[in-house]
Image (tube, coloured by chain):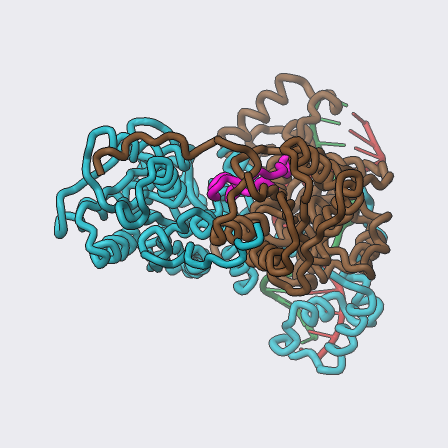
Chain colours: A cyan, B brown, C red, D green
Amino acid sequence: MTNRKKTNITLAEVSKAAKVSLNTAAKVLAGQSKTARISEKTAKKVQKIAQTLGYVPNQMARNLRAQKTRIIGIFVADMIDPIYAAITHAILEELPKHNLFPLLTVAEAGYEMCRQTWLRNRIDGLIFCGTNAEMTPQVFAELKKRNIPAVIAGNYYLPSNHSAFLPQVSLVHIDNHAGMQLAINHLVEQKKQKIAFITGPKFHSDAQDRLQAYEYIIKNYQKTIIADLNTDERFWQRGYLALKKIFEQNIKIDAVIAYDDLVAIGAIKFLNENSVNIPNDVAVVGFDNLPQAEYSTPSLTSLYQPAQAIGQRSVELLVKHLEHENKIEHVHMMPVLVPRESTQFGNARNNQNYISHL
Amino acid sequence: MTNRKKTNITLAEVSKAAKVSLNTAAKVLAGQSKTARISEKTAKKVQKIAQTLGYVPNQMARNLRAQKTRIIGIFVADMIDPIYAAITHAILEELPKHNLFPLLTVAEAGYEMCRQTWLRNRIDGLIFCGTNAEMTPQVFAELKKRNIPAVIAGNYYLPSNHSAFLPQVSLVHIDNHAGMQLAINHLVEQKKQKIAFITGPKFHSDAQDRLQAYEYIIKNYQKTIIADLNTDERFWQRGYLALKKIFEQNIKIDAVIAYDDLVAIGAIKFLNENSVNIPNDVAVVGFDNLPQAEYSTPSLTSLYQPAQAIGQRSVELLVKHLEHENKIEHVHMMPVLVPRESTQFGNARNNQNYISHL
DNA sequence: CTGAAAGCGCTTACAG
DNA sequence: CTGAAAGCGCTTACAG
């Protein structure tokens, strides 16, 4: 391993070069010249010497002595998922503004590995970008025992036997109820009267919330039509199979809201293959506004997931907890409906130029 | 800030509880029982006590004393880009296998911020998942001076005045030449004879490599047809405008290879809007095999970017450098052609069931 | 306004 | 096989 003794200079060396005590140099470089009432002349001198020597403080020594690290663990349930990636990204941008440092751990490493990393590095707080089956109520209990505040950002894994920890941890996520209301309003405006819902994976909090919201709201407009699958199919296959089932059972629909965009695109695939006109015969709405929504044909109306805001808000909440403001909060961020071709007429396919030369 | 003095127990406490010296406990818990010839009985006793007390070593103290950290900085040029996300993910999974620890820094923080983070935490090595305009040759010179080995994984920012550092840093990226050969072979097999190429952003290494590879290989088959844009348009707009230009100039083509999938999807959008049949009239191939490739209509033939392998390989290279194996390597990983509807006939739209009830 | 000393929790020689 | 001591580079009282 590289030996770097010669390349890194220390506070002691700076103080010696500046001909002041170690203490004085430390105070100046920690930005405490004012409170320690160090003369401006001395401060300037020390700063200049530190600059020319290329002094960079050793964070490990600092943390060890100060008995706090300002390191925030970030658990990422799935970095390949664009929503988690966006939330993680927002958190990484936000932490430095509060003089906090990220320590990223990924789900694939396994819980014990993550735990070791957090504890060895003496994290001062923890943000979960999603959770998985390993994140049991016991995990949150240990964090609490060790005085490590935690916040969950985004979707989380929620089998019925896990729900006990919910009142004990702060959450920040999309307002699925509001999102569903926006989706239904939008479709009702388009005179749709048989709006179906395709469910998502059973143990995802967002899937549960969206299903509940659909059931609760749709009653005001029509009979409930739920396309549920008893399989573990995910991604577009789920939407494809769900619609296949509906059509095989000869259930009449004129619109479908899918748990998420991938499921919605599966539904579109099925409709396209069977020459069902979108949106005239069946309109489609997804959730999350993934990049795929813009690129599908027809492009997909979706509910924008405010990932940036979720990330920021979860950092703010964690900072409050670090400052011993221990009130648990569950924050719901508003989604935005992004209308595209899958629910609206005449937005594309009308630009018939440039074909003459073929 | 949380005070955790009471919740974290130290080596000293373990050794006291086990009634051995601090040194003995340290040796056992660092896994050096054998080399220090500590009796198995003592080792077992210490381990058990450490376990029951919940001892977790303090990484900061370790690093400070040992004068090395095994922390690897990871610079991510764009976490929202699925390719960078996938490479980053692979690196995060790979590092722990070598007993190395990641420290993630993102481009948006700015170079100076990243630099401070790296140096304060005394990183032992650095992997760039992409670079940007701030990563000048001087940056690599400083790393070299400080004995911090670096590896670039994936695409990198390459204006002509930056190329000086290339012989001094190890690179791992997709083999664009091989990818282009695969793409052209595939199209030639489909009897295509007027294959155009749509360029990418000027300063991206992948864009430069792909353009060069196209020019070099296509000469064996046909006249060169390059759709270049003097704009900064990115994403699908770039492909859309490039094809528009070609069609306006009445240039005949029967296939198009795009710099990447988003550009390819822009081309598809243009062809769809002008009722040009894909792939019969014009076939389309993209690079990177993004999720969007599967979800576009028609689905897009693309070259799979081996992100997982790139991440793994870059960690391996870095490990070699940490072990003072200082030979610089430029590694090219093979892409895989994923054929889909945009180059092949009759793969979809033939499943005309379930429409009767509408 | 400035300085000398203790100590955070480990690892690394060195002694026996 | 086991132990006592020094020191990594800082910050934190405390003294003057």
Q: Nearer the viewer, residue A335 or A349?
A: A349
Q: Is residue B163 left or right of residue A171?
A: right
Q: Is residue A196 left or right of residue B100?
A: left
- Residue B108 position, x and y percent, is 60, 61
Q: Is residue B108 left or right of residue A115?
A: right
- Asked if residue B33 is positioned above or below residue B8 in the image, the reply reads above
Q: Nearer the viewer, residue B86 or B147?
A: B86
Q: Which residues are the magenta region?
A: B288-308
- Asked if residue A67 is positioned above or below residue B285 in the image, the reply reads below
Q: Is residue B320 left or right of residue A257?
A: right
- Residue B296 lies within the magenta run: yes
Q: Nearer the viewer, residue B205 or A343?
A: A343
- Residue A299 position, x and y percent, is 41, 51
- Residue at point 42% right, 44% down? A130
- Residue at point 62% right, 44% down? B254
The residue furthest top is B40
- Residue at point 36% right, 42% down? A268
Q: Nearer the viewer, residue B246 or A35?
A: B246
- Residue at point 71% right, 48% down? B206
- Residue B161 lies within the magenta run: no
The answer to whether residue B85 shows anywhere in this view is no
The answer to whether residue B289 shows anywhere in this view is yes
